[in-house]
Image (cartoon, coloured by chain):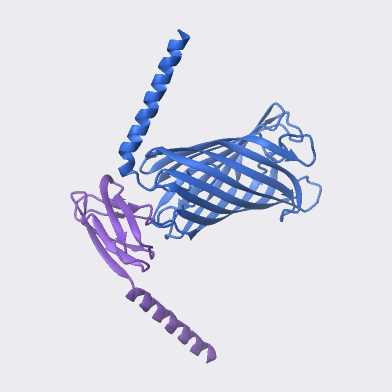
Chain colours: A blue, B purple
Amino acid sequence: MRYVGKRHAIVALAFFASSIAARAQDDSAFLREIETKYVFGFTEGSGIGLEGEKEFSVDTEARLGKGGTRYWGSESKLEFEFTPNQYVQFEFGPFVSTHSIKNVADLDDRQQMTFGGVFGEMRYLLLDRGPSSPLALTFSIEPEWRRIDETSGAVVNNAELEVKLNADLELVKNRLYLGSNLLYEPEATQDPDHVGAGWAMESKGGGSLALAYRILPPILIGVDAWYLRHYDGAWFNTFTGDAIYVGPTLFMQLNPKAFITAAWEVQVHGSDVDDPNAKLNLSEFSRQRAKLKLAVEF
Amino acid sequence: MRWTILLTALSMTLAGLTAGAQAQEASVSISVKNHQFQPAQISAPANVPIVLHVKNLDSTPMEFESVSLRVEKVVVGNGEGIIRLRPLSPGRYNFFDDFHQETNGVLVVR
């Protein structure tokens, strides 16, 4: 009986897979180019939108798990994005910060949702993808001001600058894409321990690789991997720990003017200078992280 | 006095460059009728700015859109839209009407 059930499941799965493949094949002539910016999860593609395009989105990034009973910290950006010409894109908006923390070492218990700060972003297209070149490259710079610490949820005065190189390569035309980011992110927090110590500087650096495959014209699935390093000091001064994240990604075009993108990643390896026996770094990074973005163009 | 001469020379240089750039612009026209591009394939020279005139001969609005050209523009019914494209490398650039997804066309750059 179990064998018959298994066989039915395999036949159904094969039928489902073949119908997807057949549909994808049928649609291959009609597959249009896609904007690659949001197809790689946490890795950002090179897309800068289309001249004249405006977009509003809710973009939530959550950090989950730091040991203890419960840890959730998230920021939801309420983004307005526009592309004034064929080379530059701008984004800006406020973000909402949410924390739910219970019995986590070095962090106060907290249950809150509040205005977290503001951000802006400029993206400049360095290398254009064209019929003869499958590679595209974008430089992005994103200043942020925070009034809520993204890890602890405490009230702070924090400034951060996220600098990125976003590259992607079209491996199979309109089907398979490889994305990669290089990250440098210095930040400064005014007297974080309230002891009159002035500004505390730290920085994060890292790189990513991601693959996205278009299984149906409006749907891409893939995998995203990040290697991140954390330092005290704004210029990678003193190494404190690192982490590797890996996880699946999803991009779905809901209609010509709306899409959703989601990603979930798990820390699979990490190191902490203060805890040489640790297999993960849970002091600077979370056990898992997730991203969900819903966007509407107009 | 020296500043006046310098500014005059600079503005003349810029004006010359602009005039030169405008002289090298390519102008291309396409129409939309019964939700079909006419012609469905247009061509333009490579590596010069392109001015694309899109005439909508239908009574309903259309949205000219292309990811590879990186533009989108709504053209009202019985209206005309002007789209300025950056210099393009040789190849085929697909476009479509985002309000009528079956309306497709291609720009061939040589």
Residue nearest the observer in this picture, A167 or A107: A167
Q: Is residue B87 above or below residue A73?
A: below
**Residue farthest to the bottom, as pictured:** B1
Percent of width and height locating residue A125: 49, 58
Number of marks present in the image shown: 0
Left or right relative to B89: residue A166: right
Q: Is residue A8 above or below residue A53?
A: above
The quarter of the rendered structure image containing the C terminus of chain B is bottom left
Left or right relative to B68: residue A209: right
Residue nearest the observer in this picture, A132 or A179: A132
Instruction: Residue A160: tell me if it is visible.
Output: no
Residue nearest the observer in this picture, A215 or A56: A215
Percent of width and height locating residue A134: 44, 53
Q: Quadrant of residue A242?
A: top right
Q: Is residue A243 above or below residue A83?
A: above
Percent of width and height locating residue B71: 37, 56
Instruction: Residue A190: tell me if it is visible.
Output: yes
For the point 49% across and 38% down, the residue is: A222
Left or right relative to A225: residue A66: right
**Residue farthest to the top, as pictured:** A1
For the point 65% across and 34% down, the residue is: A268
Percent of width and height locating residue B2: 54, 91
Residue nearest the observer in this picture, A205 or A296: A205
For the point 33% across and 66% down, the residue is: B50
Q: Quadrant of residue A70?
A: top right
